[in-house]
Image (spheres, rainbow, N blue to C red):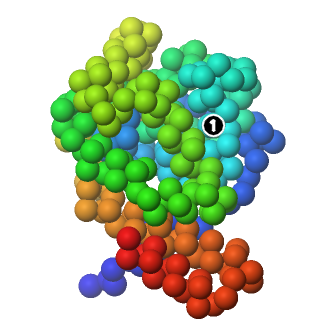
């Protein structure tokens, strides 16, 4: 029996980061697949599945953890679309930000599907929608505890490399899409969730559109994309229990970065006292 993978092996994006300024980049591979699948709709499984089918890379919210400066550019995109700050992104901007990817799923890309469909008219589009009630309950049990955590909010002020970028961007995105009501008005939030998917259905010709629900396996997706069915089972990743483990790791890694940054300026006892407080919170 092979040993169980370590946390860095299971979730390398939480431990190892690059520092690439996407504004210096351009498209190097064609964008082939656009998936509208909001957070908590099985997007981690979808990303893994698309990679198994040969698409490299596949953009996902994890990409903002893998390369933290991406959050800065997404902040610009969100500000322009929802708050009238700056210029809306055009094909050149998307090629800079997503030019290394052949596919995308999850937020932030899910809320920019109209723009991405216009930018990449030849890409095939997959609508991966979860039952709105189940989706919202999952949101309350996972995303809400993360973004409202006093520890995470505190660390975001000190951890300028990752959380200090990701938290403001994620907050602005959710406020923009759901008008600041995401955790306060379930019916409105679910109606916006439904509307996002319906908009995509109206924009894409039927021959380029697949309605897909996780649990349907490889068959429909492979038929649609013209791919052979892999010999491995369809991925099932990032269930609620695993999500909580990842959040705990995110907190610990953020604290390590903060401690390394500020330890030269504070006493060791103070640093460890703060660590003890944060990690117990």
Name which residue lies at 47% across and 31% down.
175
Q: Quadrant of residue 73?
A: top right
**Left or right, 245 with reference to 159:** left
Mark 1 neighbour density, 10 Å: few (under 14) some (14–19) many (20 or more): many
Where residue 194 appears, as percent x and y from the top left, is 30, 21
Q: What secondary structure is marked by label 1?
A: helix
**Left or right, 260 with reference to 192:** right
Where residue 34 appears, as percent x and y from the top left, is 47, 29
Name which residue lies at 49% across and 27% down.
176
Relative to the observer, which residue lies in front, 88 or 254?
254
In the rendered view, tell whether residue 156 sits above or below residue 131.
below
**Left or right, 231 with reference to 177:** left
Residue that mark 1 sits on: 75
Where residue 189 appears, as percent x and y from the top left, is 31, 27
Where residue 49 appears, as percent x and y from the top left, is 37, 47
Q: Residue furthest right?
A: 24
Q: Quadrant of residue 78?
A: top right
Screen quadrant of the N terminus: bottom left
Tell me how many marks there are: 1
Name which residue lies at 39% across and 64% down.
246
In the rendered view, tell whether residue 47 sits above or below residue 83.
below
Q: Quadrant of residue 91?
A: top right
């Amino acid at each position: 029996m092979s040993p169980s993978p370590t946390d860095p092996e299971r979730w390398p994006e939480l431990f190892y980061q690059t520092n690439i300024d996407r504004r210096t980049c351009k498209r190097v591979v064609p964008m082939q697949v656009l998936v509208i699948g909001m957070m908590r709709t099985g997007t981690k499984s979808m990303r893994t599945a698309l990679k198994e089918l040969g698409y490299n890379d596949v953009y996902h919210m994890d990409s903002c953890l893998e390369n933290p400066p991406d959050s800065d550019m997404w902040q610009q995109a969100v500000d322009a679309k929802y708050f009238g700050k700056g210029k809306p992104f055009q094909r050149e901007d998307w090629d800079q930000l997503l030019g290394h990817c052949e596919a995308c799923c999850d937020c932030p890309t899910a809320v920019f599907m109209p723009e991405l469909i216009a930018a990449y008219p030849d890409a095939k589009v997959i609508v991966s929608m979860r039952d709105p009630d189940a989706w919202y309950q999952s949101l309350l049990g996972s995303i809400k505890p993360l973004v409202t955590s006093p520890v995470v909010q505190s660390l975001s002020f000190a951890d300028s490399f990752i959380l200090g970028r990701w938290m403001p961007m994620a907050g602005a995105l959710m406020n923009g899409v759901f008008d600041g009501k995401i955790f306060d008005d379930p019916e409105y939030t679910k109606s916006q969730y439904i509307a996002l998917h319906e908009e995509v259905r109206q924009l894409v010709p039927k021959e380029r559109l697949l309605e897909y629900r996780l649990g349907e396996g490889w068959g429909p997706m492979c038929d649609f994309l013209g791919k052979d069915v892999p010999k491995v089972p369809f991925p099932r990743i990032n269930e609620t229990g695993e999500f909580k483990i990842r959040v705990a790791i995110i907190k610990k890694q953020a604290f390590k970065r903060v401690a390394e940054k500020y330890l030269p300026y504070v006493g060791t006892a103070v640093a460890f006292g703060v660590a003890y407080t944060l990690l117990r919170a």
